[in-house]
Amino acid sequence: MHEKILREKGRVVRHSIVELIEHWAIALSGLALVLSGMFEMPMAGRYSINTVPGLAWSGDYIVSLKVHYVASIVFVAAALFHAVYHGLRGDRGMIPRKGDIRTSIEVVKSFFGKGKEPPFHKYLPEQRLAYVGMAVIIVMLIVSGLVKTWKNIYAPDMSYAIVLWATWVHNIGFVLFILAFLAHMAAIVLKPNRPMLRGILTGAVSLDYATHRHPLWIAELEKSSAALVEATGEPESAQPVPKAEETPQQPDDEQTKGDESMSERDKIPQVTDGNFDQQVLKAEKPSLVDFWAPWCGPCKAVGPILEELAGAYGDRVNIVKLNIDENPNAPMLCRVRSVPTLILYKGGKELDRIVGLAPKAKLEELIGKGLGA
């Protein structure tokens, strides 16, 4: 798998070199098709584009036509390669999912300060919708373009109705391609999306950006890394620690038990997606929820501390844990972006949270907020 976290460089590899080449092949050949198509109209001579150094050829219809054909070959080849390559690999990340439209609206609202973005996987919901839209446009251009090319070279007496339909579909696809390209550029200009430009150019994005905006994807990468470590027999210390949304507090001597078995944490009650509302949000006592995962190293160090706190405050505070791998809904609703995350609830509302490994004193301070509120 080419996706990996380069923690020492502060980056996450998002796309392989093959994906970058196919992306730029489609983008540049598509741009060449747009320009050469306009030069055939002819626009270059009308607006003196052919007087620009290096674009003298734009005023020649035959040259523009040849450029159009060459660009179309690259465009079709890159599009077919994309479909076959990712189809064989079983890549499904860009296929739209249920709720993408609703989530995309929430994202747009967050740009204007209305609400917060939910945590995302590798691709944003609007990216998946745009992908399908662009795929439809590309199919329109390729099919209609092949019909027109066949007519020009092999069937000059092709049915007028077919030629007319192909021309209209091609022209509509042409306009939609330009609009989609402009929309793509406009989306990157938006401040929350600017860090994605690095990924488009180099295939890697900032680890801070990925952790903040794509925490579910980072969690998957951490999980895969942990599984690889276990399979290859590497020492656990080599396992990357999930980067928290905030800088974690340095652990004290009480937190040096990170290598202890997770079974010790079974002393703390487990809640699920099914009973989260009843056991946490509707609980009579304040509830401290530990969102954790079996593959998370820091989560192991939190366990003994929570057991001590449960012994000291268990009669006044409901201390529970929730496995995010087995229960994905509650973490998403609670906007849990990394583990461990400990959230304090009272009266069905969040009072405060701690992200990352924290000392016992910090957790006691968090519990105190629930008892004093």
Image: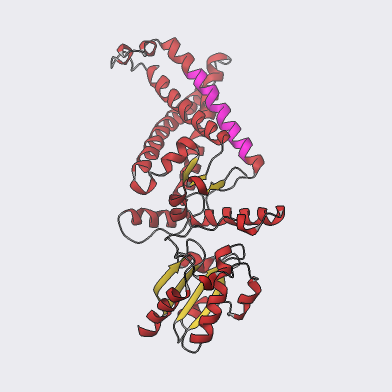
Where 310 falls versus 93 (above or below)? Answer: below
Q: Position of residue 351 (x, y in %)?
A: 38, 75
Q: Residue furthest front?
A: 253
The reply to whether residue 347 is visible in this rendering is: no
Q: How is the image coloured?
A: secondary structure
**Total numbered labels placed on residues in the image:** 0
Where 354 falls versus 137 (above or below)? Answer: below
Q: Which residue sits at x=55%, y=65%?
A: 298
Which image quadrant is residue 286 in?
A: bottom left
The reply to whether residue 206 is visible in this rendering is: yes
Q: Which residue sits at x=36%, y=16%?
A: 42
Q: Which residue sits at x=38%, y=17%?
A: 39
Where 278 falls versus 165 (above or below)? Answer: below
Q: Residue furthest bottom?
A: 315
Closer-to-camera residue (23/128): 23
Q: Position of residue 371 (x, y in %)?
A: 39, 84
Residue 13: within the magenta? no
Which image quadrant is residue 197 in?
A: top left
Quarter of the image where the C terminus is located: bottom left
Q: Which residues are magenta?
A: 68-86
Closer-to-camera residue (240/276): 240
Q: Position of residue 311 (x, y in %)?
A: 53, 85
Q: Position of residue 24 (x, y in %)?
A: 49, 31
In the figure, is residue 35 to the left or right of 141? left
Secondary structure mainly formed by the magenta segment: helix
